[in-house]
Image: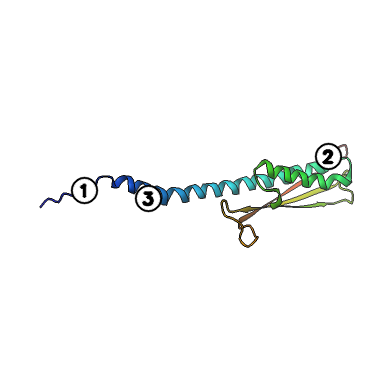
Amino acid sequence: MISHRNDHGSATVEFIALSVILLIPAIYLLVTISQLQAAGYAAVAASDQAAKTIAYTDNDSHAQSRAVQTVHLTAENYQLDPSTTNTTIHCTNAPCTTPGTQITVNVSIDVPLPLIPTFLGNQTRIATMDATGYHVIGEFE
């Protein structure tokens, strides 16, 4: 016996269904990974540039505020929210701008899940990226 089934148009429906099931999670995964990568690059660049900002600032009273501004600017350049950054600055000598001082800047950036709203006032985050930058002020800088 030969059965004659009518299969007209089912390939389009199957293609759309499989595309939704497979492509949307894959695209979401790629967006999440790119956010993590951007936060990692931003943390490294921000910690390095903040340490250099402190080293090359003439006035010690403005050095730390300029370093924090540098971290926020770097986060904005990587299209991240500056409020998710946390900066810790440590200098070996009392005034950070004196020659021979080793400056250590630790930057941590919280990476939120993309397209997920805040839950009870707290941002849902996937990871925190940390980086530490060092700079030693030379005698003639």
Of residue 35 and residue 19, the one placed in the foreground of this image is 19
Of residue 49 and residue 119, the one placed in the foreground of this image is 119
The residue type indicated by label 2 comes to Tyr
Locate residue 6 relative to residue 137 in the image: left or right.
left
Mark toward the start of the polypeptide (1 vs 2): 1
Find the distance from the CA under tag 2 to the CA under tag 3: 58 Å
Mark 3 Cα shell of 10 Å, populated few (<14), some (14-19), many (≥20): few
| Residue position for label 1 | 6
Find the distance from the CA under tag 3 to the CA under tag 1: 20 Å
Residue 49 on image: x %, y %:
75, 42
Locate residue 106 relative to residue 129 in the image: left or right.
right
SS under mark 1: loop
| Residue position for label 2 | 56
Could you tell me which residue is drawn at 35 percent across and 46 percent down? 15
Residues at marks 3 and 1 touching, judged by CB atoms closer than 8 Å: no
| Residue position for label 3 | 17
Residue 55 on image: x %, y %:
83, 42
The residue type indicated by label 3 comes to Ala
Could you tell me which residue is drawn at 68 percent across and 40 percent down? 77
Locate residue 117 relative to residue 74 in the image: left or right.
left
Mark toward the start of the polypeptide (3 vs 1): 1
Of residue 111 and residue 83, the one placed in the foreground of this image is 83
Q: Nearer the viewer, mark 2 or mark 3?
A: 3
Q: Residue reaching furthest bottom?
A: 120
Residue 53 on image: x %, y %:
80, 41
SS under mark 2: loop
